[in-house]
Image: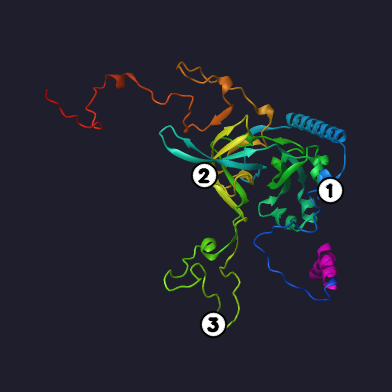
């Protein structure tokens, strides 16, 4: 059994690739330590952006206008077919087992804004925009396991077989991208996307290829997990990067913010992991247990309580929280579709000054949030019967004798 295992491993494509590198380097293997971040794309993937600018192609204005019109029509047709597919998809509001994993959304962080509770409390929220999300690819565990090294780790894990669902966000001009990058969107029947994100999904929650994803995939009151790159601070010193104290202010020359001695006594080398100046930020971080307090359906905006990693304009992966006490027990499976939409009529408010409904966005709020369309202070009959007490906030006024 061990001999057959060794034979199958040595005949794998990874070993063939390693053999080519070994022969190219003259039989020597050089070890490279793993970096904390990768700022350049891997060489074995096809390029994404077209390096030749559109201005240097030399096409006329008429041809350019015709090309833009064709691209616009293709995007409209793709969106129409995607919406028809979403109407035909079988979805329902059902119980979500603990072993199920739903697809997530690729969102953009557009800012932070406070919200107010009915008791007057202040909640600082992060605003996340769901910008034209579509399902671009659905890969089975077997295909994923055979295709990549990441699939060998994640396709069959302790939670069972997992499908890789690729979600694209933000429609872009296809002329800015290579033909190899555009092929995946042509197969899915969706416009070319700027950003792609992958999620691990179980078989009972698989969406359809090309299906659009809505902000109502999540519900108000549920908890989510946000994953993204932290703010890129560039090259920073030891005091900013690691919070070091620095050296004394007095009797020090040109070394106030330096880290000091970094060597060891007998080894004459730097230990791996030594805290030194270097690149700070732009690393993957995950924040779990964030509560959704408000959803703007018309603008496809989600208000999340708390902060998420990343700077303004950065893309994040938003998915269901897996903590047992914060897990979503019931929701749309596999995702929200227009067939689940219900018309909810709010009661007419008799108070004056209420904003008409046609001037408001279609939104859902958490019950604990204060609605600015409702009156701020409500007086009852018991409040009117109360005797007016002495106002202690006003200063005493001296009596002037005539």
Decide: marks 1, 3 in contact (CB < 8 A)?
Answer: no
Q: Quadrant of the N terminus?
A: bottom right
For residue 398, side relative to residue 217 (left or right): left
Under tag 3, what secondary structure? loop
| Disc 1 residue crowd, few under 14, some 14–19, many 20+, Cα 10 Å | few
State the count of labels. Answer: 3
Disc on the earlier residue, 1 or 3: 1
Disc on the earlier residue, 2 or 1: 1
**Rendered location of residue 28, percent (x, y):** 80, 76
Q: CA distance from mark 3 to mark 2?
A: 46 Å
For residue 66, side relative to residue 276 (left or right): right
Decide: marks 3, 2 in contact (CB < 8 A)?
Answer: no
Under tag 2, what secondary structure? loop
Depicted 395 relative to depicted 387: above or below = below
Under tag 1, what secondary structure? helix
**Rendered location of residue 157, percent (x, y):** 68, 55
Disc on the earlier residue, 3 or 2: 3
Looking at the rendered image, the disc whose residue lies closer to the viewer, 3 or 2, is: 3
Specify the farthest residue to the bottom: 266
Q: Residue at x 63, y 42 (%)?
A: 108
Q: Quadrant of the C terminus?
A: top left
Give the quarter of the image for residue 313. top right
Q: Which mark is residue 265?
A: 3
Which residue in the structure is indicated by mark 1? 180
Which residue in the structure is indicated by mark 2? 306
Q: Residue at x 54, y 61 (%)?
A: 241
Of the pair 223 and 314, the residue shown nearer to us: 314
Magenta span: 1-23
Asked if residue 350 can be seen in this view, the reply is yes
Give the quarter of the image for residue 110. top right
Q: Main secondary structure of the magenta part?
A: helix
């Amino acid at each position: 059994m061990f001999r057959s295992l060794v034979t199958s491993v040595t005949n794998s494509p990874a070993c063939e690739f390693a053999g080519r590198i070994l022969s190219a380097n003259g039989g020597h293997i050089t070890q490279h330590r793993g970096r904390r971040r990768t700022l350049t794309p891997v060489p074995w993937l096809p390029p994404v952006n077209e390096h030749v600018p559109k201005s240097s192609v030399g096409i006329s204005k008429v041809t350019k206008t015709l090309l833009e019109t064709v691209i616009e029509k293709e995007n409209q047709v793709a969106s129409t077919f995607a919406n028809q597919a979403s109407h035909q998809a079988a979805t329902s509001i059902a119980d979500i087992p603990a072993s199920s994993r739903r697809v997530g959304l690729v969102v953009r962080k557009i800012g932070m804004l406070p919200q107010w509770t009915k008791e007057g409390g202040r909640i600082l929220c992060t605003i996340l925009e769901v910008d034209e999300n579509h399902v671009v690819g659905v890969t089975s565990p077997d295909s994923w396991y055979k295709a990549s090294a990441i699939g060998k780790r994640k396709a069959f894990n302790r939670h069972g077989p997992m499908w890789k669902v690729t979600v694209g966000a933000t429609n872009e001009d296809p002329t800015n991208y290579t033909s190899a990058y555009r092929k995946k969107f042509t197969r899915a029947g969706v416009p070319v996307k700027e950003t792609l994100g992958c999620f691990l999904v179980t078989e009972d929650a698989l969406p359809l290829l090309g299906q659009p994803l809505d902000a109502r995939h999540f519900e108000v009151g549920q908890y989510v997990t946000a994953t993204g790159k932290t703010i890129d601070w560039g090259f920073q010193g030891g005091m900013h990067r690691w919070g070091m104290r620095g050296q004394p202010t007095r009797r020090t020359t040109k070394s106030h913010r330096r880290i000091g001695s970094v060597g060891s006594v007998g080894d004459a080398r730097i230990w791996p992991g030594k805290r030194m100046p270097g690149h700070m930020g732009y690393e993957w971080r995950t924040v779990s247990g964030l509560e959704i307090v408000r959803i703007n359906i018309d603008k496809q905006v989600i208000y999340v309580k708390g902060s998420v990693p990343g700077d303004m304009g950065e893309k994040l992966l938003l998915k269901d929280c897996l903590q047992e006490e914060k897990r979503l027990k019931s929701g749309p499976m596999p995702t929200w579709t227009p067939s689940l939409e219900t018309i909810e009529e709010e009661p007419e408010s008799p108070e004056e000054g209420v904003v008409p409904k046609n001037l408001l966005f279609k939104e859902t709020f958490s019950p604990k949030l204060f609605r600015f369309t409702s009156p701020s202070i409500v007086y009852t009959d018991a409040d009117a019967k109360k005797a007016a007490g002495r106002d202690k906030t006003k200063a005493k006024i001296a009596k002037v004798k005539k």
